[in-house]
Amino acid sequence: MPVKFDENLLVGFNNCDDAAVYKIDNERSLAFTVDFFTPVVDDAVDFGRIAVANALSDVYAMGGIPFLSLNVMGFPLGSAPDHIFSDILKGAAEKSMEAGVVIGGGHSVRDKELKFGQAVIGFVNNNEIIDNSGAVPGDYIVLTKPIGTGIVTTAKKLDGKVKAKTFKQAIEIMQSLNKKTRDIMVENKVKCATDITGFGLLGHLYEIASASSISIEIDSNEVPFIYDIFTLAEEGFFPGGAYNNREYLKNYIAFSKKVTELMELVLCDPQTSGGIAMFVNPERLEKVRAMLKEAGILSKVIGCASKKLSYDIIVD
């Protein structure tokens, strides 16, 4: 697409970052994003909450604080009770209020399939911008939130036998804001991070490896997963995006012989409102982990950044 140069556009689409960042003065910038999708759960209120948490996450991942949003909805006339739409908006309002974000309005269109999400704008201090290009060799990769929401929601849609504990954990993960994680990253001067969403864990890490001109080494044994996720994976409950992600990444990732095909797909599972993968200076790692734990946020060190190698990502 044609690109118009503007020196105030500090972060655009060149490095597949989570949000655009536009400088408004010498102190602050605006972070702007939009995200919407079809329902991942049957409960309309839960869907509204999840959609908002997912949209806000892009701003948090950039080091920003969201403050204003617009609802975006596509709806099929006559295909669902009217309360479905009001329930979605109710869930969205609840999660926005929790985040301290004002919903300023929105836009809806007729669509063949129900869709919902938000356009979100936030402030970010110019010296606190977190993007995909700031990783350096030696950084540790800290991941929050377990992986597997795509598999769980697919299994649920296809009437798979999803354990109550598994589904409850997936809902909690998707509804959880990355707000506190953002605060901890900024306090510890993290310069590179991304939220894990549609391209899966490996897809989003590839974007960072490419933008930062580094390679990434991952220990698959250290990656956190949703409870009983491999039972569902063995039964084949993968969303189509998992296969698409793995196919796209096949020339950029080297898997060791011990990594099974099943594990490859799980690591490519598209997430909704997933966790943050942050690249942390070794000197700050202990403090970051301690602060995350104190905030009640799960975190695991899943790998590290290294100098550029033959492959962008090496998974052991």
Image: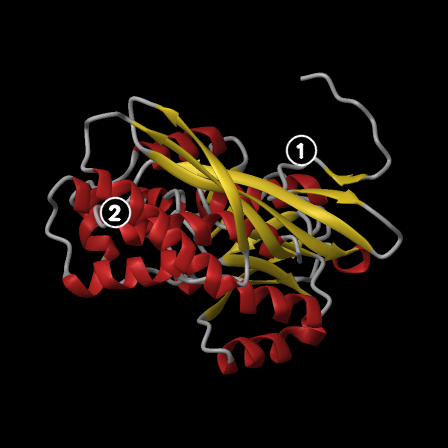
Q: Is residue 80 left or right of residue 119?
A: left
Q: Which element type, helix, strand or loop, lies under badge 1?
A: loop
Residue lying at 24% horizontally and 42% vertically, measured from the top left: 84
Q: Is residue 183 above or below residue 306?
A: below
Q: Is residue 224 above or below residue 73?
A: below
**Whole-percent x and y of residue 170?**
30, 58
Q: Can residue 213 be seen in this view?
A: no
**Whole-percent x and y of residue 256?**
44, 48
Q: In this view, does 13 lie to the left or right of 47?
A: right
Q: Which amino acid does label 1 sit on?
A: Phe
Residue lying at 71% horizontally and 50% vertically, measured from the top left: 307
- Distance from the alpha carbon under mark 1 to that under mark 2: 30 Å
Q: What residue type is labelled 2?
A: Val
Local crowd at mark 1 within 10 Å, few (<14), some, or many (≥20)? few
**Whole-percent x and y of residue 120?**
57, 45
Q: In this view, does 140 lie above or below 289?
A: above
Query: Residue beneath label 1, please?
Result: 13
Q: Quadrant of residue 12?
A: top right
Query: Residue beneath label 2, please?
Result: 41
